[in-house]
Image: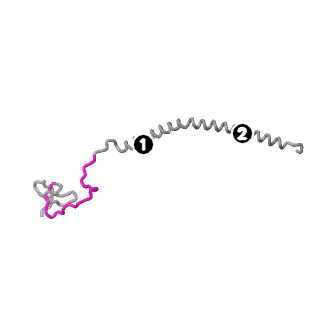
């Protein structure tokens, strides 16, 4: 048997593979195949050996993530401003009504306190 060397492909029908294995004629690397080679094994379609490189995404993944995050941030700020402008007049009305009710309660408490003091005032003190 002939050992592979640095001879050109035309000088030898054998090919030395990347891991040091001697391939026969017509192998994947361009040499010929012999009868001693094992037939190919069926592999899961999820595992593909010689995949063609995938083209890069139109927008880099980092840029897409950043664009998505800032878009969500901007939409959240716009929604918050709209919601604040919607709720602000209602809150002002509630505060105004609460202040009026507090004035009425305070006036009622003051009157009750004066009546209680008037009833307690006696000569026996």
Work out which quarter of the rendered image holds the N terminus and state it: bottom left
10 Å crowding of disc 2: few (<14), some (14-19), many (20+): few
* Residue 94, image quadrant: top right
Work out which quarter of the rendered image holds the C terminus and state it: top right
Question: Where is residue 90 drawn, in percent x and y?
Answer: 57, 37
SS state under label 2: helix
75 or 64, which lies in front?
Answer: 75
Q: Is 75 part of what is drawn in magenta?
A: no
25 or 22, which lies in front?
Answer: 25
* Residue 111, image quadrant: top right
Question: Where is residue 9 drawn, in percent x and y?
Answer: 13, 54
What secondary structure do most residues of the magenta stretch adopt? loop
Report the side of 76 relative to 39 (left or right).
Answer: right
**What residue did someone put label 2 on?**
106
* Residue 108, image quadrant: top right
Residue for point 17% across, 55% down: 29
SS state under label 1: helix
Instruction: From the image, state whether disc 2 or disc 1 is nearer to you.
Output: 2
Residue for point 17% across, 60% down: 22
Above or below residue 1? Residue 114 is: above
Residue for point 83% across, 43% down: 119
> Start and end of the magenta stretch?
30-54
**What residue did someone put label 1 on?**
69
């Amino acid at each position: 048997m002939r050992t592979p060397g640095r001879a050109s492909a035309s000088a030898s029908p054998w090919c030395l593979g990347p891991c040091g294995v001697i391939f026969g004629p017509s192998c994947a690397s361009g040499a010929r195949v012999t009868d001693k080679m094992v037939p190919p094994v069926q592999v899961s379609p999820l595992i593909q050996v010689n995949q063609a490189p995938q083209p890069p995404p139109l927008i880099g993944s980092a840029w897409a993530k950043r664009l998505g995050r800032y878009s969500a941030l901007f939409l959240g700020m716009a929604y918050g401003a709209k919601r604040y402008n919607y709720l602000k007049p209602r809150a002002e009305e509630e505060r105004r009504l609460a202040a009026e009710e507090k004035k009425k309660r305070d006036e009622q408490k003051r009157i009750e306190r004066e009546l209680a003091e008037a009833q307690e005032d006696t000569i026996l003190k």
